[in-house]
Image (spheres, rainbow, N blue to C red):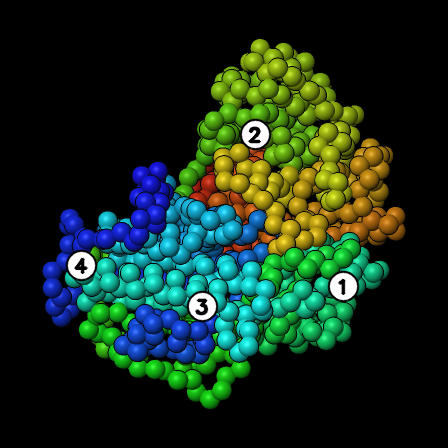
Amino acid sequence: MSPNRRTVIAGALAGGLITVAGPRGAWARTAPSAGDPVRVYLIIVDGLRIDEVPLMPQLSELAGTGTYYPEARAQMSAETTPNHISMLTGMRADRHGMPGNAVPGLPIRVSDDPRYLKADSILTLMRRQAPDLRSATIGAKDYVAESAKHDRTGDGEQDTTYSNDPITSNPATFDSARDEETGTEALLVSREHDPDFLFLNLGDVDRYGHFDETGGLTGGELPALRRATLLTADQQLRHLVTELRSSGRWERTVFIVTADHSMDWSFRDALVNLAPAFAEDSLLADEVFAAVNGGACLYGLRSPDEPKAGERLRRMREIALSVEAVEEALYLHPNPDDGGKQHWVGRHHPHWGLGGDFSGELLVTVKPGFRIGHHESAPLWLANPIPGNHGHPVTLPIPIVVSGGWEGLRQQVVEPDGQPGVADEDPSQARNIDLAPTAAWLLGLYPPPGGFDGRVLHEAFRMRPPSRVAVSNVASMPTVERLAGGDDFGDAVAVSSHAFPDGADAVVVVPAEAPWHAAGAVPLAIRRGGPILPARASGVPRSILAEVRRLGPERAYILGGKEVLGGRVERELTSAGVSEVRRLAGDDAAATAAEVAVELGVAEANRQAILVDGAGDSTAGGRGLADAIAAGPVGGARYPADFANDDRPRVLDQSAATGELPRGRRPVLLSGDTSLPETTRAALTELDIDRVLVAGGTHRVPAALEESLRGEGMLVERIGARGPGETGRRWAERGVREGAYTDELWLAAERATLPSLAAAAAAGYRGGTLLLIPPGELSQRSPARRFLTERSDEFVHLRIAGGEDTFPGSLADAVIELLHQRRTRSG
């Protein structure tokens, strides 16, 4: 929002509501006629309950003149983030990627960063299929506004034509602009842009509900503040309707008004806190972290691939169900250690659509009137939200009103069939995932890749309007860019210049002729903020030196002794302007990896290391190095707060996400055939490692070595399996689960060591995902094909590292053709 707009809004609020004239310019409309296009306004009154609709005169009028669904449903968890995204995408959380306001493992609300959105929204459909259509998103809350600002078309601009940055003149509203401000912004945008689709979030009903110490009801009546916020929201609806009518646009407008969830109330003593019980259990102590969402909590395990994970989850479920206030405790994925699908949320509530990358492993919901927190030492009575509450099934019922001035609307109340429970769906009722399909249908758009989860609310209309502009049924393809430079050195420069266009803090120099000394390079490069660049034993190639000069790093790390990277390398880096050159080396590859690990260090609360096959220097490059490269982006994973190219503030909301987060510095160490090299063991001791992630199957790191580590008191997870590409796929999946973007997917050939190293560091630094593809492996059953197929709708940018000699054009074409088949829809 520009300063001028801020000034206009501030003046309007100070002097009374502004008078808004009709639209000017190319889309000033004349009187309506049959067959004219319509505009769609989707308006969310955050936290509105069904029983409160009669208290809002304008909304009641709209309900009486259009189609009213009095028992519609939101999506679980009944929180702000997943439901706003469900309304914009027409999909459930397991597809759009945002299951709660807080999710396990991320220190931010997932909606704070639109790159976590895994599905095309209606804004993206408009941008792709009909760029002349105009859209506007206006959010009262920062994280709602941010979630709509994505560039899923990859054209360098946000998909929505206009979006706001919420402002507030009342500090008590924290990150939420007052409805008067947001509503005035909507009026200005309606007048100046006349969008075909407007998405408006009004937040005061929800925001002030969280400060309502009366518990929502006093003597059978709503308290005065609650009534006031309802009337304020209703007033914004009335202003929009009045403006559209006075400008002659109402007759071609469809208004859809709904809530993202309803509200329950809880008091300070109505808190369920399972953390102390988990901490006292020997199987669960230090293993559980949580993301609380009001009346629901998503629990995750610090080591979800560890053999005892299923047993731990079973114990967690038993403890949860022993608490009287707990409603349900269900697994987010089938648990083979506890009946398989017997207690799986997909069996009991398939319409909830929970699961996916960020849901964690266990969902616990509490009964009406309670909320859930997570704090080991004492009840966290300030846990969000208090006392206004939502997030559990009782807050799923919402009103949906489809109304407006368009002649194609029907006037009716769609009553539910029977008496559906609050956690149930009724086929006769609308759901919020039906709103994007309905808006797309009204605007003449085609469905997104994979289709909608919701349906078009055909019963609300007597006809379908035409689109205002021509609509193209285009394939929703990601951008594709090959980063290559003619040889391994040129490839590394191409990757570096793309990932670090504005320079880098450091560079990591690895031996091109002895790459197994680079096993630990990827996490180091990511955490130090620079690329991996190869050099010869005899010196640094000119192209690499030129890239070092361009990057301007203060520090360079040389991996390996002078027998693999001679003293001339140090001198040339110094002459290229590097202030500090450090050599990390040992007598062999395992010793070098140990030196790198000690330099990198570990996170204090996350003392983990990655172990890969290092059986013999001469073979490590062909055996364990590919596993080390695949694991590297996870080993160096940075939180979103670390991203140098993103200046938005990132603050861990302790009321929403608690417990130790799983990501952080994880150095890579090398194993031997049947035991650990002394240098590896010394590094484990010095770093006080208590958890080891084994990369590769037992044909790489034998099971006996894994068991010996457990015998020494370490917790061990194995992420890998026999077969080409399976280890790479599993590490890519682990990275995504911990917060890596699939928005940006880096592809490299598994055996192209130097381009793969460069790509791994770049992917990890930018927060993206790396997928290594074995030679010729994109067959029907290949792990790489499975990854690309299952996630085909998620990718926005593909980066291919290496030229034709390392990543053949036929393989690149096969990837693109696969995605084209998956992402082309006939509508």
Which amino acid type is marked by label 3? Arg
Whichever of labels 1 and 3 marks the residue nearer the N terminus, that label is 3
Which amino acid type is marked by label 4? Ser
Residue, x 22% and y 61% (percent of image)?
Answer: 244
Give the foreground label among 3 and 2.
3
Q: CA distance from mark 2 to mark 1?
A: 39 Å
Q: Which residue is mark 1?
A: 312
Taking depth in this image into account, of 264 and 14 the one nearest to the observer is 14
* Res. 456 image quadrant: bottom left
Q: Which residue is mark 3?
A: 227
Q: CA distance from mark 2 to mark 4?
A: 57 Å
Residue, x 50% and y 40% (percent of image)?
Answer: 648
Give the foreground label among 1 and 4.
4
Residue 419 screen position, x and y as percent:
49, 87
Whichever of labels 1 and 4 marks the residue nearer the N terminus, that label is 4
Give the crowd class for mark 3: few <14, some 14-19, many >=20 residues within 10 Å: some
Taking depth in this image into account, of 153 and 255 the one nearest to the observer is 255
Q: Are marks 2 and 4 in contact (CB under 8 Å)?
A: no
Residue, x 20% and y 57% (percent of image)?
Answer: 470
Which amino acid type is marked by label 2? Pro
Whichever of labels 3 and 2 marks the residue nearer the N terminus, that label is 3
Q: Which mark is residue 247?
A: 4
**Element carrying mark 3:** helix
Left or right: residue 522 compared with residue 672: left
Taking depth in this image into account, of 488 and 176 the one nearest to the observer is 176
